[in-house]
Amino acid sequence: MILLKDGVEYIQCNYKYENELEKMVFEHHKEIFGDNTLLFNKSKIKTVANIGTIPDAFVVDLKNKNWYIVEVELKNHDVYGHVNSQIMKFLDAIDNPNTKKELSDKFYKEVINEPFKEALFKTNNIREVYKHISDIIDTNPSIVIIIDEITNKVESGLNLLSRYHDIKTIEFKTFKRKNSNCLDEHIHLFNRLYNIGENQQNVNKDNNNGDNTNTTKSNNYTEDDHLNGKPEYIINIYNELKKQILNIGDDITIKPLNQCIAYKVSNNSRNSRRTFVNVIVRNSKIRLDLCFGEDDYNNFKRDYLNWDMITWFDNYYYCGIDLKKNNELDNIMSLIEKCYEINKDS
C-alpha cells in the first residue's frame, strides 16, 4: 500500500511527544466530534477520595447533549500501568458531585469570556447557557482515547474496561512527505464520532485527502439491547438473576452500558453510586464480574480461592463467574450480596 499526493509519496509520522499529537487532534476536534461541539482544555478533576487527575481535554456536544472526556496517548505508552489507571481515575471522579459542579462552572466561565464559544450557543438558539451546560455535565460522559496507532496490546488493554464503561478509541494517524522532517505538508487519517440523528457522511479530510467512516450508538443503552437475539433460556436466567439481585436491597439501580449491564448501590460515605456487579449476557451463558476494592479483593480471594467457577483478575480487583443454569444461582448470590455490602459500606 502506498499513499501519494501530487505524485509525492507520504509515509506515517511517528510522534515523539504526546503534545505534538495533541496539537493536531485539537485542531481537528470538530471533524472528530461534530460541528456543534466545544473543546475545553485541561482541568484537574478530583475523585471522592480527593485524588486529582487531569484529562487532556473535554468536549461538549451542545446539540445532542453529550460530553466526552478526552485522553490523547501514544502507542508506546503503558496501556495497563498508565492509560487504564488514568481512565479509572476519570471514572471515579465522574461519581463525585463536586467535580461535575466545578466543571459546569469552569465551562460556563470560558463560554462567557470567549466570544466564539458563546456564539455557538446563539447559533443553536440556546439562551440559558449555564443550565444547558450543567444539564449535559450531569449525564455520564464517554471516555475517548485518541492514539496514534491501535496496536494489539492497546486494543487488548482497553477492551477490558470498555466492557463496563462507554470508552471509545480513535486511531489518529498522520502522514508526512517522504524524506522530509517537516510536518507543514501532511495528511491525517482518522475515524469520526458522529451523533445519532445526524444524517451525514462520516468523512474526515485534511488538505482534501483521505476518508473513512464509522458509526457509534448513543449512550442510551437498554437491557433489551443486551437481551435481543439471545436464547430464551438465557433470558430466563437473566430475569431470575435480576429479580434476586434487586431483592438484596431497595437502593440498587440498573445502568445498561455498551458491553454490560451494571448494578449499582448507593454509597452514603462517598455520596455516589458504586458498581458491585457487571452482567454480560452472551448466547450460551451470563458472565458476572464482581467488583470490590484492593483490600476486600485479597480477603475475597482467600475465602473463595478454591472455587473453580471464579476467574481472578489481580490488576482490576474483581473476579469473573460464568452462570449457565438457574440452579447455580444460590451459591453465586452469596458472592453478589457480599460485593453489595462491600460497595455500600466502603
Image (cartoon, grey):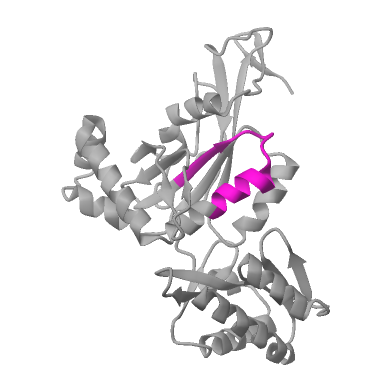
**Looking at the image, is 289 positioned above or below residue 111?**
below
Q: Which of 35 and 111 is in front in this view?
A: 111
Looking at the rendering, which quadrant does residue 118 occupy?
A: top left
Residue 61: x %, y % from top left: 36, 46
Most foreground residue, 47 or 189: 47
Q: In this view, does 236 lie above or below 273?
A: below
Q: In the drawing, does residue 134 fall left or right of residue 165? A: left
Residue at 69%, 7% (x, y): give it.
Answer: 179
Residue 341 shown left or right of residue 27 in the figure: right
Q: Which image quadrant for residue 151?
A: top right
Q: Where is residue 32 in the image (x, y as percent from the top left)?
A: 47, 37
Quarter location, residue 30: top left
The residue under the point 52% across, 41% down is 71
Image position of 290 (left or right of 261):
right
306 versus 69 height, above or below? below
Q: Report x, y in % for residue 163.
A: 62, 60
Task: Name above or below for residue 153 compared with residue 222.
Answer: above
In the rendered structure, which segment of residues is drawn in magenta?
Answer: 69-88
Q: Is residue 76 magenta?
A: yes
Q: Is residue 277 visible?
A: yes
Q: Judge whether residue 281 is colored magenta.
A: no
Image x and y of residue 68, in percent: 44, 47
